[in-house]
Structures are given as C-alpha cells and as structure tokens.
Image (cartoon, helix red, strand yellow):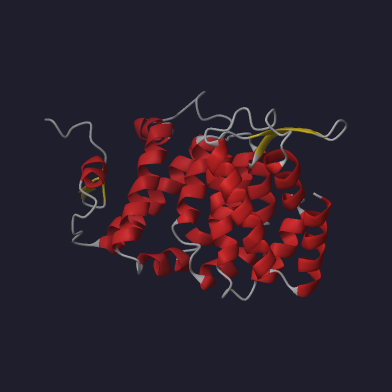
Amino acid sequence: QQLVDEIYIGGVYIRFFLKQPTYKLSNPVLFSEKLVEFWESSFKLQISTSTNSSLSNSTAVVLAQSDLLVLLTSCIICVVKGEPSIIDLLLTWGFVQNLSDNLRKALDAGRRGSPTISVIRLLMQIVHRPDIVDSLAQGRTDLIFYLTKSMYTTSNTANGSCSIAKDAAIIVELMKKIFLCTAAAQIGLLVHKAVESNLPHLILEHILDARSTTSCAQVLNPAALRVYSVDLLKAMLIAADPATAAVLRTLLDTH
C-alpha cells in the first residue's frame, strides 16, 4: 500500500533509488533505457504549450510534473556515476546529441527553470569525454550559442543592459568543463562559436565588470559565478586556435 504512489521504472522505485544511489542495479542497461524514455516524455510535456491545459490521461499528468523531471534527471546522473559505461549507450541511443536540441527547444519555448537546468545537469556529467564534446560540437544545434543565451533572461541592445539568469553559475561551470576538454578534436570550433556568440563580451561586461552588480542582481551565487567566469576565459584561451586566441587576448586587453 505504501508503494502505490511511488514511480516504478525498469524494475526500480526511483525515489528509493535516489536515497540509496550506491545500490547495485540488477539490470542497469534496462533501467537506463526506461529512464531515458520517461525523461524524454517528461521533458516534451514540460515544454509543450498545451501541457497544463488538456492532458489526456493520468500518465501524462504524472510526466508533466516538474518535480518528476528533476527526479529522472537525478536518477540518470546517479546511474552514470555508478556505471560510467552507460555514457556509451546514451551516445549510441542519440540521447547525448538530443540534449543540445532539447536545450534549444526549452529556451525557444521560454521554459527556463526545470527543463533548462535538467539538460545542463546531465551535460555536466558527460562533457569530460572528448568523444562527447565532439559529438555535441557536430550536432544540429549550436550548443555554445544556446548555453550563452541561457545565461541571461533579458537583454537590451539599445542601452547595453543585461539581466544575468539566476542559475548562470552552473551554466558557466558547464562551459568551463567543456573547454577544459582540450583532447576533443572540435574544441577549437567550439571556442570560435563562443566568440561568435559574444560569450567573452557577456562575461567581461556583465559579470566581471565592477559595475555589473545590477546585471547580476538575480544570480543565486554571484561569487561562484565570477570565479567560474575567470576560469572559463582561461580555458577558452588555452583551447583556442592561434587566430581565435589573438581575438580573445584583444578583448581581454581592452577590459
């Protein structure tokens, strides 16, 4: 009776699994496959414009709950930490490549918060691998452009004002991890895309500038954001090709 309201996926009660993340799964592949299926369904409902207006069945109601997406994200992270080989399956299933697309869909739909942060949390666990970074770089969606876009909530080009998102620290930390993966063949391309997306300008003008307190007023951890921002710029300089590195140094010198 106590388990009636618990979510059961791939032979596992997910809430109990999160309380015991070191629990040895009998079939981690099946569990991961089902987790991914539920995660993608939950994410799709989260960003759908009609999610809360006309859900057709009880399963859809459950999947549309934002806390479920958070739970599923945490479960995937726990599985990856316990069974690192699962990352290979996530790559094979196309889940890794779809994360960039899902970030774009969430931002285009104006669905920040749970959908956006769930994608970023998952990426944080896998971008240490060069093959993952290369796969993301070659994907349909410009990941760096959309990560940069996710860093701010409003931007006024007329007066140069910008409001940095409250979760910007974890986004910058993710990009730092990406650019630290210098063994990736496409890392230079990603640095070039970052420059094209005005990421260095955004950091220098609206995060590191002493006058940027207004821009960062909503940030949850502004001190961590500034530390990660400095580390990110350093990582970009190391990962950049000579031409892009010269552009970055010029930007840094002017600030």
Query: In the rendering, at what x and y percent does residue 209 appear?
Result: 73, 40
- Residue 32: quadrant of the picture: bottom left
Q: Residue at x 57, y 50 (%)?
A: 228
In the image, residue 248 sits, relative to residue 185, either above or below, namely above
- Residue 187: quadrant of the picture: bottom right
Near-viewer residue (63 or 163): 163
Query: In the rendering, at what x and y percent does residue 126 appear?
Result: 46, 61
In the image, residue 192 sits, relative to residue 38, either above or below, namely below
How many marks the image carries: the answer is 0
Q: Residue furthest left?
A: 1
Residue 160 visible in the shown view: yes
In the image, residue 111 sits, relative to residue 124, either above or below, namely above
Q: Residue at x 41, y 65 (%)?
A: 87
Residue 141 visible in the shown view: no
Q: Residue at x 63, y 52 (%)?
A: 230
Q: State left or right for residue 34 relative to residue 191.
A: left
Q: Residue furthest right?
A: 158
Query: In the rendering, at what x and y percent does residue 90 appear?
Result: 43, 63
Near-viewer residue (183 or 207): 207
Q: Residue at x 88, y 32 (%)?
A: 158
- Residue 8: quadrant of the picture: top left
Near-viewer residue (238 or 53): 238
Quick one: quadrant of the N terminus? top left
Q: State left or right for residue 20 relative to residue 70.
A: left
Q: State left or right for residue 8 relative to residue 202.
A: left
